[in-house]
């Protein structure tokens, strides 16, 4: 199934002499369960693309179809609804609410989503399960300033998963982390990918991009190269004959992932 389809996507900022074409006719298709890294120089349009894919912004022209739904023409309220229903975000700066516990941060998307199918107690349990899935059961009642950077990013990942999103968007998710914490975050993204999630991740680092199965390079608002990765970094999993990775019939790679809900 196609999760993302864009046609001639453009985004321009400003007018006349100061016009900036941040995106200049981007055609891209991303299928269910792809793990895509977006790379490119500073200012090449990566975050602009992520904002549009994440329904945080609208293109100047062109089309964006998300999981079969044409979203480029929707208004702000409709975009907000799609964000809360279908998308999970992981940013470089974590974007957690200060003076708010890990548990409450994870709960937020459930409070905003208007599906009345869960009681408050059930929502709380879902949030606790999500924190367990990232190995943070014992930090549920800590506030962000009481957590390390890696732990804060894991809270952000738990929050991104809470609505069982069809698409996870990560803009430099390891940009502020040390090597060890980056490794933990990449392991979590691998687990999510193995469980059927679709992931689009911006990174400046080659070793982080090597974790993805496909790398799209941007330059001046255009796709410069689009390559399938032949290997995965720091991953001992054998490659199958068709070039895919043997992930079926295997236990999840870490105990942490056992709590993760599987993709519907
Ligand atoms: N709100 C805005 N108003 C005007 N110009 C903007 C705005 N946002 C982005 N731009 C311009 O659009 C271009 C693309 O920006 P974008 O943030 O997408 O780059 P990027 O690839 O994410 O870069 P980086 O790697 O530095 O994060 C840049 O030239 C930037 O200056
Ligand atoms: Mg950026």
Image (cartoon, grey):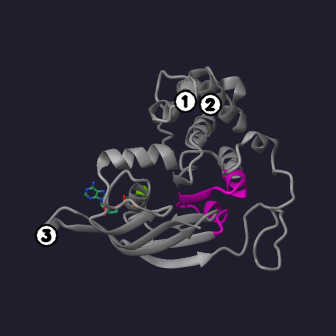
Asked if the stretch drawn in magenta spans residue 204, the answer is yes
Q: Are marks 1 and 2 in contact (CB under 8 Å)?
A: yes
Q: Could you say which quadrant of the image residue 242 lies in?
A: bottom right
Q: Which mark is residue 107?
A: 1
Estimate the spatial distance between the alpha carbons at disc 2 and disc 3, rounded to whole Å.
49 Å
Q: Position of residue 25 (x, y in %)?
A: 35, 76
Q: Is mark 1 within 8 Å of ligand 2?
A: no
Q: Position of residue 85 (x, y in %)?
A: 49, 45
Depth order, front residue of 44/168:
168
Q: In the rendered image, which residue does mark 3 sit on?
A: 17
- Asked if 95 appears above or below 1 in the picture, the reply is above
Q: Could you say which quadrant of the image residue 69 lies in?
A: bottom left
* Residue lying at 29% horizontally and 51% vertically, measured from the top left: 75
Look at the image and tell me whether residue 28 can be seen: yes
Whichever of callouts 2 and 3 sits on the residue coming sooner in the sequence is 3
Q: Is mark 2 within 8 Å of ligand 2?
A: no
Q: Which mark is residue 127?
A: 2
* Residue lying at 73% horizontally and 57% vertically, measured from the top left: 194
Tell which tag, 2 or 3, sits nearer the viewer. 2
Q: Quadrant of ligand 1?
A: bottom left
Q: Are marks 1 and 3 in contact (CB under 8 Å)?
A: no
Q: Quarter holding the N terminus?
A: bottom right
Tell which tag, 1 or 3, sits nearer the viewer. 1
- Asked if 239 appears above or below 149 in the picture, the reply is below
Depth order, front residue of 248/176:
248
Under circle 2, the secondary element is helix
Whichever of callouts 1 and 3 sits on the residue coming sooner in the sequence is 3
Depth order, front residue of 84/230:
84
Q: Magenta span covers which residues? A: 189-213
Q: Is mark 3 within 8 Å of ligand 1?
A: no
Asked if the stretch drawn in magenta spans residue 79, the answer is no
């Amino acid at each position: 199934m196609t999760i993302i389809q864009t046609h001639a996507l453009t985004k321009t900022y400003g007018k006349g002499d100061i016009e900036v074409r941040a995106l200049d006719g981007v055609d891209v298709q991303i299928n269910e369960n792809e793990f895509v890294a977006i790379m490119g120089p500073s200012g090449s349009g990566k975050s602009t693309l992520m904002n549009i894919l994440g329904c945080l912004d609208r293109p100047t022209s062109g089309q964006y179809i998300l999981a079969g739904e044409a979203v480029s023409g929707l208004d702000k309220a409709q975009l907000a609804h799609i964000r809360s229903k279908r998308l999970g975000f992981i940013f470089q700066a974590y974007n957690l609410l200060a003076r708010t516990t890990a548990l409450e941060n994870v709960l937020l998307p459930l409070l905003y989503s208007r599906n009345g199918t869960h009681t408050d107690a059930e929502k709380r349990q879902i949030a606790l399960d999500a924190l367990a899935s990232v190995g943070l059961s014992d930090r549920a009642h800590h506030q962000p300033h009481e957590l390390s950077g890696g732990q804060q990013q894991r809270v952000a990942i738990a929050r991104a998963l809470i609505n069982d999103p069809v698409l996870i968007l990560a803009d430099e998710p390891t940009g502020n982390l040390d090597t060890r914490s980056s490794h933990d975050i990449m392991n979590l993204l691998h687990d999510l990918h193995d469980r059927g999630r679709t992931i689009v991740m911006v990174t400046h680092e080659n070793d982080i991009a090597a974790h993805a199965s496909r790398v799209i390079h941007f330059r001046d608002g255009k796709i410069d190269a689009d390559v399938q990765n032949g290997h995965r970094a720091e991953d001992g999993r054998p490659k199958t004959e068709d070039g895919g990775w043997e992930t079926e019939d295997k236990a999840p790679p870490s105990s942490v992932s056992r709590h993760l809900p599987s993709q519907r």
